[in-house]
Amino acid sequence: MSAIGARGSTSHEKAVRGCACARWTLLIAALALLAPLAGCGAGDDRVLWRLDGRTISDGGMLQPTVWATGPILAITRAREVTGYDAATGERRWSAPLPGRTCGASARPSGGLVAVQFGRGEHGCERIAVIDLRDGRKVWERPITGERHARAQVVAAVGAVVVNWLHGTAAFGLEDGRPLWHVGGAGSGCRFDGFAAGPALVAARTCREGRDQTSAVHGIDPRTGRPLWTHDVLPGHGIGPLLSSSPAVVGFRPGRQGDRVSRIVVLDESGTAVSDFEIGGPLECSLDLDDPARCEHVVVSQDALYVTSGAWPDEDGTFPPIRAYDLATGRVLWSTENPDGNHLFPIAMDGDRLIAAQPGVAGFKGRGRPPRLVSVDPSSGETTIMWDLDRAADFPLRSGSHRHYAQGRLFLTKTLVKTGQDDALLAYGPAKG
């Protein structure tokens, strides 16, 4: 050992060791910061696959419609409907359209969906029906002889109904045969929106001079004639048609814009079964092409599950999911939100309610990624299913389209632009 080594370190050696120590300190600090990020999904194997904005919108902007049906996840793209393997994202089929897509029926009927499209820059003059099972185009035809903008399209009980600003037209679901056509410029009555499914329900407004009346109707999809009528109370506006069977309608008391706070459940004759206020307003779409869309609402055969808003109360707590009995309007239960954070209902999955919970920001292990939660519909008891990655947090908070089917969650932005990296995200249980 040298004399220098025996006596201790030189100033140079101390400096080198000090630099090394500083580097280790910085590295440890960096890892401490990265740890919660990794917990938020960096390399998370629950991400099954994703689509970027260019793939979907083809250089423009698009409001896509998505259907999750068994092994297929289908989406309207710029000039086609494309079916992907729901587990892998592999393309299974493509149904080209001779024009740019404008809108589509939100729910399939017997595996069939209707898509509105057109050739002009603002034209949406044609309608086609696509079979989601194999991508086959069943039929295609013009809506009417006039020019059309984006409209609401529904498929229900053997009919396709297209509702635009000045009229409504219906066609046979399987053969495209024209069934009925009402409205047009100068008509005193118009349909404000439809809810489809096992039945067809519509909101309708009639004007005569300064007088205006509104009503909810059950509609015969083959003839367009009302099967029953439920008149709207004075001072109320018809809100979203949340369900057609059972018929569940939201109402806006007074002039409250898009804020819905009253729910009426109607039987098969249009008679009110229950009429109740919910614990806070709903934020609902006012778009003609999607009048039934409300955030954080799920309707089953016997209950309404709703979270009223995404902001904390005055005491800092977030509103729970509340379950309302459709037969009585009575509150059945309220969830105890895990960690006290939001819970947003997404869909029914057999005998359980699926909900999502946004993440919590934080460092040094205090953060938490967004996650999926199941809720027992008989008691409101919650069970954490699995975590998502950080990319899911904004879509969950911002009201993107959410679909849960076959044990998988799909999040799609409502407006897709070319430069978006994660326009559609597919999640599933952890691999292995």
Image (spheres, rainbow, N blue to C red):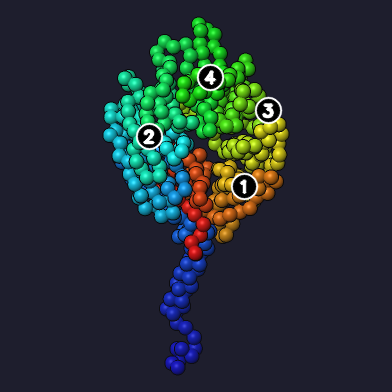
Q: Amino acid at mark 4?
A: Pro
Q: Nearer the viewer, mark 4 or mark 3?
A: 4
- The disc label shown at residue 351, or none: 1
- Which sits earlier in the primary sequence, circle 2 or circle 1? 2
> Judging from the image, what secondary structure is the residue with disc 2 in?
strand
State which tag comes first along the sequence, 1 or 3: 3
- Circle 2 sits on which residue? 129
Q: Which numbered disc, 1 or 4, marks the residue closer to the eye?
A: 4
Q: Return the residue found at the far bottom.
A: 1
182 lies left or right of 203 = left
Residue 362 visible within the image: no
Specify the quadrant of the image occupied by residue 171.
Answer: top left
* Whole-number angstrom distance, CA of label 2 to CA of label 3: 36 Å
Mark 1 and mark 3 in contact? Answer it, CB < 8 Å: no
Residue identified by numbered label 4: 226
Q: Position of residue 121 (x, y in %)?
A: 29, 28
Query: Disc 1 versus disc 4: distance between alpha carbons?
Result: 34 Å
Asked whether 89 or 341 is in front, the reply is 89
Q: Which residue is mark 3?
A: 274
What residue type is disc 2 on? Answer: Val
In which quadrant will I find the N terminus? bottom left
Identity of the amino acid at label 1?
Asp
Left/right of residue 282 with respect to residue 28 in the rendered view: right
Q: Residues within 10 Å of mark 1 (few under 14, many from 20)?
A: few
Q: Is residue 311 above or below residue 361?
A: above
